[in-house]
Image (cartoon, rainbow, N blue to C red):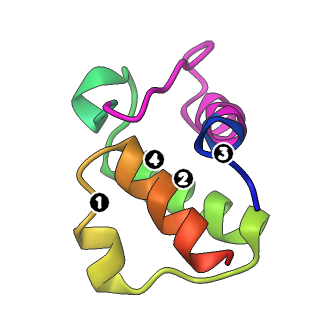
């Protein structure tokens, strides 16, 4: 099983690619307000890219309950057990 740090490193790559505003450096506390270019359209693309990378689908309630990157990391860990 992957660690939170490993997943954050992978998410950094996804966010950097999707947002295309230069290097992104995420922490567990990072929210959309902290990242330039992380808007609602990019959010959908990020969720899709995460689903594609890890091979599962999020439910709508799961997506709606994400408050920060830490929530996303923990959900990925839960869904990949």
Pick the quarter of the image with the C terminus. bottom right
Do callouts 2 and 4 mark residues in contact (Cβ within 8 Å)?
yes
Residue span colored magenta: 9-29
In whole angstroms, how far apart are the C-alphas of marks 1 and 2?
A: 13 Å
Q: Nearer the viewer, mark 2 or mark 3?
A: 3
| Residue at the (54%, 73%) spot, across then down | 78
Between disc 3 and disc 1, whose residue precedes?
Answer: 3
Horizontal side of residue 21 vs 52, given as left or right: left
Horizontal side of residue 2 vs 77, given as left or right: right
Q: How many residues crowd around disc 3 within 10 Å: few (fewer than 14), some, or many (20 or more)?
A: some
Do callouts 1 and 4 mark residues in contact (Cβ within 8 Å)?
no
Q: Position of residue 64 (x, y in %)?
A: 24, 70
Q: How many residues crowd around disc 4 within 10 Å: few (fewer than 14), some, or many (20 or more)?
A: some
Circle 1 residue: 66
In whole angstroms, how far apart are the C-alphas of marks 2 and 4?
A: 6 Å
Quarter location, residue 56 = bottom right
């Amino acid at each position: 099983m992957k660690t939170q740090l490993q997943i954050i490193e992978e998410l950094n790559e996804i966010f950097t690619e999707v947002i295309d505003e230069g290097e992104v450096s995420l922490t567990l506390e990072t929210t959309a307000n902290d990242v330039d270019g992380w808007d609602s359209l990019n959010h959908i693309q990020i969720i899709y890219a995460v689903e594609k990378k890890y091979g599962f689908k999020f439910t709508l309630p799961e997506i709606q309950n994400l408050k920060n990157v830490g929530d996303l990391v923990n959900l990925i860990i839960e869904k990949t057990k």
